[in-house]
Image (spheres, helix red, strand yellow):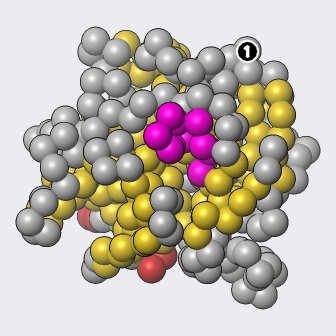
Amino acid sequence: MSVEVVLRAAAAFAECPTWDPADGTLLWVDMNRSEVHRLRPSDGADTVLRFAQPVAAAKPRAGGGLVLSMRDGVAVREPDGSLHPLADWSAEGVRGNDAGIDARGRLWVGTMAGPSAPGWLGRVSPRGETHRALSGTRLSNGIAWSPDGRRMYFVDTPTCRIDVLDYDLAEGEASAPRPFAELTGTAGVPDGLCVDTDGGVWVALFRGGAVRRYTPNGTLDREIRFPAALTTACGFGGPDLTDLYVTTARRAPEFDEPLAGSVFVVSGAGQGLAATAFAG
């Protein structure tokens, strides 16, 4: 498969590539620079929104605008540009990280643990109530669902594995976490992930310079290499959802390759699932 640079960005920490079918653009964040980008692959135009704190994920919102997983909680950015807090966990000592939206438009967010506060994975309601499914996580990443919505995938990066949970789509409840794929003994650690229409799980290997695909039974199926070691996340996009977009980070001096921090695309990699906008 051919790997191409869709945007030579030199981002500090690009993350969370999310296709917005409403206007045919790719949302992605430069987390440590507190930026949300909207990339139009057809001509390479990339617009930037800047915020007062780090943004780990940006997702489309059904009512217009965006829902943001930020350092201190979740916020909604209205179409007019105003920002409204939805959930605040700044007093807990944790930091918001990756996010995902299920097929019914429910928002799930994972957090990074603080020095004396364990992280967690939970669902955030449109009213800002947090319903936690997992506690004691350290670095939450990679939240996605199987095509039938009955499985939820999740990465707690230091465990070096992808976990799977049973998911009740009608109720929005996740339970029975268990290992899906072990990535110990590999170059890099698991970070962001996505799922294709065949149920394959694609995961970026941070410090591994690669994205791997695992079959629905957890068997390694293929690996795509990238010219940047800090591959952070992946997501399908394009008019037919057949292009795999991959974000990367740059960290000097160890990970300062010429293309580090760029956004890559692998055309025809597979068939992605249509994204659902946040219903809140």
Is residue 48 at least partly visible in the picture? yes
Residue bearing mark 1: 217
Q: Which of 64 and 256 is in front in this view?
A: 64
Spot occupied by residue 22 in the image (x, y as percentages of width and height): 28, 45
How far from the left and from the top, in percent, is residue 164? 59, 24
The segment highlighted magenta reads 236-245
Instruction: State the residue at coordinates (38%, 64%).
Output: 38
Say whether residue 275 is left or right of residue 241. Answer: left
Q: Is residue 238 located in the magenta-colored stretch of the structure?
A: yes
Q: In terms of secondary structure, where does tag 1 sit?
A: loop
User: Farthest residue in the right direction?
Assistant: 185
Viewer-closest of 271 and 192: 271
Q: Quadrant of residue 48?
A: bottom left
Compared across the picture, whether 79 is left or right of 52 comes to: left
| Figure quadrant of residue 12 | bottom right
Of the 4 image quadrants, the one containing the N terminus is top right
Above or below residue 90? Residue 24 is above
Which residue sits furthest front?
43
Q: Is 188 located above or below residue 9 in the figure?
A: above
Give the quadrant of residue 221. Answer: top right
Amino acid identity at mark 1: Asn
Q: Residue 84: where, in percent of width, then height?
A: 12, 61
Q: Is residue 58 magenta?
A: no
Residue 111 position, x and y percent, is: 44, 52
- Tell me the crowding category of disc 1: few under 14, some 14 to 19, or many 20 or more residues within 10 angstroms, Cα based: few
Q: Tell me: residue 198, above or below residue 55.
A: above
